[in-house]
Image: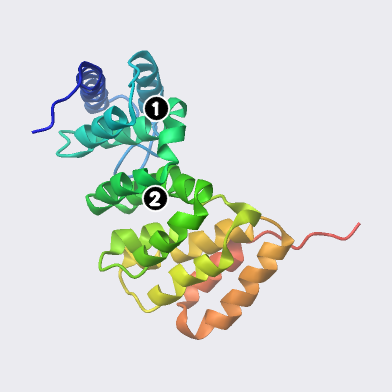
Amino acid sequence: MVIRSAAVSALVAALQGEMRQLKTTKRSGRPRNHSGQVPMIGSSSAIRVINRLVGAVPLATREEWEQAILELWNNPQHSEELCAAIGVLWHPRYRHWAGQPCSMAVYRKLLLQSPSAECVDAITTRGVSLALAHHPDTETGLVRSWALANNPRLRRAAIRAQHRRRMATDTRLLLNCIVPNLADRNPLVRSAIAPALIDYGRSGDPARLWVLDTLQELAPRLPHRVIEAVHCRLPAPALNP
C-alpha cells in the first residue's frame, strides 16, 4: 500500500474539490468554454484553477509529483480530474521532472488508460515529447518501440511524439513511427498521421519539401483524405527576396 504524503493528499483533495465545483457550474447552464470529451485542451477556467492550486501546494519530490498525477488519473469521478492530472504533469514548477527519462513509465501508464485521442495527445505533447527532446539518445528507441506496440494509444503517441520539434525533428524516427502504421485502420492511429506531418511541414521550407516528397513516396499506401489534409495545411512556398 502506497502512503500519500500530506502535500499529495492536500493537492489532490483541493484539485478534486475544485474540479467537482467546476463540473457543477457547467451543469448549472453556464456557457462551456471548451469543446471535446475532456476539457484539458481548451478549458481556460480549469487551467486557471489548476495553476493556482498547483502553485499553492508545492510537491517536494519527483515521487510526490508522480503520485499526485496517478491519484488524479486513476478512477476519476469527473473528466475534469484528468485535466487536473495533466495540469500537474505540465506545470512549469515540475517541468524538469516531466522531461526526465524515468517519467516515460508514468506516461505509458497514463496513455494505456486514456479514454480519448485528446487525452493521448495531451500526455504526448506535454510529457512524452519533452522527455524525447531532452534525452533523444535514450528515448528514441523507446518511442520507436511504441510505434510497433500492440496498443493503438501507444502507436498514436509514437507518431505524435515529436510535436513542435520543428527543424529539430528526427525525420528518420518520424518515418519509423508512421510507416509501420500505414495499414492500420484504427482511427486512433490513422488520424495521428496527418497532424504529425503537418506539424513538421510547417517548420520551414526544407521541412515542407520533405513532407511533400514523403507524401509522394507513401501515396500508394496513404488514404487520399490524409494526403489532402496535409496538402491543405502546409504553408505556401517561401518567396525568394
**Crowdedness near tag 2: few (<14), some (14–19) or many (≥20) residues, C-alpha within 10 Å:** many
Q: Which residue is nearer to you in this view: 162 or 218?
A: 162
- Which quadrant of the view contains residue 4? top left
Between the residue at mark 1 and the residue at mark 2, the CA separation in whole angstroms equals 17 Å
Residue extending farthest left? 1
Helix, strand or loop at label 1? It is: helix
**Percent coordinates x, y for residue 84 in the rendering:** 30, 30
The kind of secondary structure element at disc 2 is helix
* Residue 217, position as x, y percentages in the image: 57, 82
Q: Is residue 129 above or below residue 54?
A: below
Please name whichever residue, 103 or 156, is drawn nearer the observer in this view of the structure: 103
Q: Please tell me whether residue 144 is drawn above or below residue 84 in the rendered image.
A: below
Where's residue 104, x and y in %? Answer: 35, 48
Q: Amino acid at mark 1?
A: Ile
Q: Is residue 125 above or below residue 175?
A: above
Q: Amino acid at mark 2?
A: Asp
Return the residue found at the far top. 56
The image's mark for residue 121 is 2
Q: Is residue 85 visible?
A: yes
Q: Residue at x 42, y 29 (%)?
A: 94
Q: Residue at the spot x=39%, y=50% of the render?
A: 121
- The answer to whether 18 appears left or right of 156 in the picture is left
Q: Which residue is mark 1?
A: 47
Residue 193 in percent (x, y) is at: 46, 66
Which callout, 1 or 2, points at the residue further toward the start of the chain?
A: 1
